[in-house]
Image (spheres, helix red, strand yellow):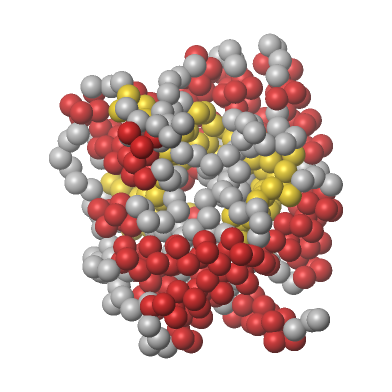
Amino acid sequence: MVNVKDILETINMIREENLDIRTITMGISLYDCVSEDEDRLCEKIYDKITKSAENLVATGQDIEKKYGIPIVNKRVSVTPISLIGGACSPEGYFKIAKTLDRAAKALGINFIGGFSALVQKGMTKGAENMISIIPEALAETDFVCSSVNVASTKAGINMDAIKLMGSTVKRAAFLTKDRDSIGCAKLVVFANVPEDNPFMAGAFHGIGEPENVINVGVSGPGVVSSAIARAGDCDLSELADIIKKTAFKITRVGQLVAGEAAKALNVPFGIVDLSLAPTPAVGDSVAHILENMGLESCGAHGTTATLAMLNDAVKKGGVMASSHVGGLSGAFIPVSEDAGMIAAVERGALTLEKLEAMTAVCSVGLDMIAIPGDVDEAIICGIIADEISIGVVNTKTTAVRVIPAYNKGVGDYIDYGGLLGKAPIMEVNRYSPARFIDRGGRIPAPIHSLKN
């Protein structure tokens, strides 16, 4: 039986509380595109992507019209390019990046992910060649996103890869310095990377995935924040129940859209990623959720506890709503994409160190954080290593998307507009970890990784 109250509640979530489907992402396998000829490889990649996803945007638009649910992004993720590029030269990998960008433009999608490498235990020659060209690839394309997995709980931490990524981040920042170093906004360094993540910049089509798949990422911080505000001064157990019930409703919307999209496109439904993904829009902030829970400001003592409670309640509510939950699934805390986080940094309540502590209990990691452009490579490596170690020791996904904004310092801003938003440049501890980073090698996997 149709419940009119539920229908009206959902309509209000969309109209007043910024509920949306953040992304429909089609995963596409490129294994059958492999070729020793670089030009033929690029040709096959372009044809496979444009044929597989030719109806993706139109399908998303049809679902929006049918249900009145905004679908903000339509995206594609592909097999990690280092796996299918093989012995390609750096120039060959650059051609592939340009091909991915051309395919994205032909389809009319927002981003394409998968210019990626998995190097948690070591690097193949192909992976080295691909990583070496990431800065140029991100500078010369508009829609290509890149990710590199440098650690896992099973393999430990590849410090050689982290050192390489420190220099890669710096070069990506330099090559796009005339655009607020936007190249770094399309580059993520991971530990325990999920293979079915629909969110950029870290999406790719994993090794164990089918030929094609539809993954959906939901949003809804504004909905959760409003529910908490309406609850008033209830105790924390009741508040957790309210968050769980709200997350259930949000995820059911995602499940509906995922099923409809998969059916229309005649591809399998993969997962719903039930992350609370904020935007710069007023009323769509994870930081404001934490403040509605009782903090004077996000970043105050107690922030990590409130975030842990929020993340847990969201997951408990979400898994009741969908049998196939995956990706990152939890609360995102990107600075530039969250109006409340920006305000907390501006008032001095939220620091880089506090953000790192918060990542121990939430979904992703240090995300969309702008730092001074003159920060040394070794310090960037240290930031990455610290965050990655949280993921490895806690058997969870963590990531770093940090932006050393050239020619800018504390007090300045980067501003990309749209979903990427703007961010104040944050202060960084300038004491160097260079001697530690230069040791190289791998940090061994933690003892609790031996579960076989």
Q: Quadrant of residue 43?
A: top right
Kindly identify the residue that appears in the image at 33 percent across and 44 percent down.
390
Kindly identify the residue that appears in the image at 33 percent across and 79 percent down.
294
Q: Quadrant of residue 151?
A: top left
Q: Quadrant of residue 152?
A: top left
Tell me, yes or no, if residue 143 can be seen here: no
Q: How many marks?
A: 0
Residue 350 is situated, as x and y percent measured from the top left of the image, at 28, 62
Q: Is residue 206 left or right of residue 107?
A: left
In depth, the one of 243 and 89 nearer the eye is: 243
Q: Is residue 280 left or right of residue 22?
A: left
Image position of 27 with respect to 358: above or below: above
Tell me, yes or no, if residue 123 can be seen here: yes
Kindly identify the residue that appears in the image at 29 percent across and 41 percent down.
386
Residue 95 is situated, as x and y percent measured from the top left of the image, at 62, 24
Residue 92 is situated, as x and y percent measured from the top left of the image, at 60, 18
Kindly identify the residue that appears in the image at 76 percent across and 57 percent down.
259
Residue 245 is situated, as x and y percent measured from the top left of the image, at 56, 74
Q: Residue furthest front?
A: 452
Give the position of the N terminus as an image quadrant: bottom right
Q: Is residue 313 left or right of residue 2?
A: left
In depth, the one of 111 and 447 nearer the eye is: 447
Image position of 352 with respect to 65: above or below: above
